[in-house]
Image (cartoon, rainbow, N blue to C red):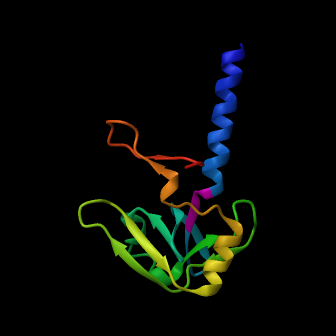
């Protein structure tokens, strides 16, 4: 029984960590709001970026101006992404949004866990990257 409890505790720890930085991306158009994907915030020096899948940003039903995110994991408030620069991968399904609006950046930094390069690790030999809450 103890090993099952330990596995449950490990799952809860992982879930809590993921909930702290996995940001739902919402598209709002004509009073309808839908979660269209998720992303994570990364700090690159003084630049805050939202990293997501490129296909999340490509839809005929909404445009970049229609995108928003919750102010915090548990808070009811929403905030638009404001202004941003975008880079999309040519071979990989990845988009990096460099958030440039000071108000948006302040809201997101206050409400969400922001990751950096020290949170990404490549396990030995595999092609998979892992997120870690410590360097």
Which residue is depicted at the point 37% across and 71% down? 58
- Is residue 57 shown above or below 21? below
Q: Furthest-front residue in view? A: 135
Is residue 23 in the magenta section? yes
Q: Residue at 39% x, 78% y: name it.
A: 86
- Segment tinted magenta in the rendering: 21-25
Residue 92: where, in percent of width, then height? 29, 59
Quarter where residue 104 is shown: bottom right
In the image, taking residue 66 as reference, residue 95 lies left or right, namely left
Tell me the quadrant of the picture where the N terminus can be found.
top right
Magenta residue check for 50: no
Is residue 68 positioned above or below 5 on the image?
below
Horizontal and vertical percent position of residue 42 = 52, 65
Marks counted in the figure total 0
Foreground pick, 33 / 41: 41
The reply, left or right, for residue 80 in relation to residue 86 is: right
SS assignment for the magenta stretch, majority: strand
Q: Residue furthest top?
A: 1
Q: Percent from the top left, x then y, of residue 128?
A: 37, 43
Instruction: Work out whether residue 9 or residue 53 is closer to the camera in this orientation and state it.
Output: 9
Q: Residue furthest right?
A: 75
Residue 72 location (% of width, % of height): 70, 65
Nearest the viewer among 56 and 15 is 15
């Amino acid at each position: 029984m103890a090993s099952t409890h330990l596995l449950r505790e490990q799952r809860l720890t992982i879930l809590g960590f993921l909930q702290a930085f996995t940001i739902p991306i919402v598209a709002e158009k004509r009073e309808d709001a839908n979660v269209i994907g998720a992303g994570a915030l990364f700090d690159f020096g003084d630049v805050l970026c939202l990293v997501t899948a490129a296909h999340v940003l490509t839809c005929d039903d909404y445009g970049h101006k229609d995108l928003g995110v919750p102010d915090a994991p548990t808070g009811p408030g929403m905030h638009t992404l404001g202004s941003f620069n975008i880079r999309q991968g040519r071979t990989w399904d990845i988009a990096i949004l460099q958030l440039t609006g000071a108000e948006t950046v302040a809201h997101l930094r206050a409400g969400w866990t922001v990751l950096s390069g020290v949170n990404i690790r490549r396990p030995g030999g595999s092609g998979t990257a892992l997120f870690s809450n410590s360097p």
